[in-house]
């Protein structure tokens, strides 16, 4: 991101105003990082403010428990696959828009899978991993060669704060891979 230092950039949170996004925003603010709100990634009510967003280095797409339950909590039918693909397209488009218009250079897809069974959590994790890879691929095709992507799946209450801590460190330049610290271990 040219012309902006790390301390003046914000984390742009796409998702509903739930406990996961509130914890992430509070942890960012506690470390002096502004957390701006974007629209919900897969439709639903927007909590985005109409004014321009500050320079953004990181964008986090949060799939709340209700969204992951509606996407992965039932058997895979044609209609369910269509909803899943629509959500994937929406997040990918928003991530590339954040990279282009807002200057985001890091994108994280975070799934709240606390309400899902083990098998459905695995499906959600595979989907989030594939989506992160797709965003990175589409970013490279569109000229965003410095765009990095990661994903996280929250499976327990304990992981909510760990994820928030990891996002702060990730935003400040910590790499999601190769770090021995437990907070960054939740990012994949």
Image: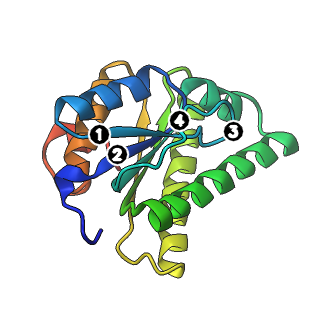
Disc with the residue nearer the chain's start (1 vs 2): 2
Element on which disc 3 rests = loop
Say if 95 sits above or below 49 in the image: below
Callout 4 environment at 10 Å: few (<14), some (14 to 19), or many (20+)? many
* Label 1–label 2 contact, CB within 8 A: yes
Looking at this view, is 54 or 104 the one in front?
A: 54
Q: Is residue 116 left or right of residue 176?
A: right
Q: Mark 4 against mark 1, which lies toward the viewer?
A: 1
Callout 2 environment at 10 Å: few (<14), some (14 to 19), or many (20+)? many
Q: Residue 117 in the image: x percent, y percent? A: 57, 24
Residue matched to label 4: 15
The residue sitting at 27% across, 72% down in the picture is 2
Residue matched to label 3: 43
Say if 11 sits above or below 98 in the image: above
Element on which disc 2 rests = strand
Q: Is residue 138 left or right of residue 187?
A: right
Q: Label 3, label 4: how many angstroms apart (C-alpha)?
A: 9 Å
Q: Label 4, label 1: how many angstroms apart (C-alpha)?
A: 16 Å
Q: Residue 181 in the image: x percent, y percent? A: 13, 42
| Residue that protrudes farthest toward the right in the picture | 78
Residue matched to label 1: 34
Q: Residue 7 in the image: x percent, y percent? A: 18, 51
Q: Is residue 68 left or right of residue 28?
A: right
Looking at this view, is 127 or 54 the one in front?
A: 54
Can residue 117 be seen here? Answer: no
Disc with the residue nearer the chain's start (3 vs 1): 1
| Residue that protrudes farthest toward the left in the picture | 180
* Label 3–label 2 contact, CB within 8 A: no
| Residue that protrudes farthest toward the front in the picture | 51
- Label placed on residue 11: 2
């Amino acid at each position: 991101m040219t012309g902006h230092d790390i301390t003046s950039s914000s984390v742009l949170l796409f998702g509903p105003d739930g406990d996961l996004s509130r914890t992430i925003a509070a942890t960012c603010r506690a470390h002096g990082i502004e957390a701006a709100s974007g629209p919900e990634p897969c439709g639903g009510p927007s909590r985005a403010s109409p004014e321009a967003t500050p320079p953004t280095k990181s964008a986090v797409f949060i799939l709340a428990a209700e969204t992951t339950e509606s996407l992965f909590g039932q058997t895979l039918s044609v209609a369910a696959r269509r909803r899943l693909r629509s959500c994937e397209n929406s997040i990918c488009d928003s991530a590339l828009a954040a990279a282009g218009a807002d200057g985001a250079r890091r994108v994280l897809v975070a799934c709240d899978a606390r309400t899902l069974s083990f098998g459905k959590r695995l499906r959600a994790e595979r989907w989030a991993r594939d989506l992160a890879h797709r965003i990175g691929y589409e970013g490279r095709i569109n000229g965003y060669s410095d765009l990095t992507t990661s994903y996280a799946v929250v499976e327990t209450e304990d992981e909510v704060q760990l994820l928030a801590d990891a996002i702060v460190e990730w935003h400040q330049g910590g790499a999601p891979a190769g770090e021995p610290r437990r907070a960054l271990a939740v990012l994949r």
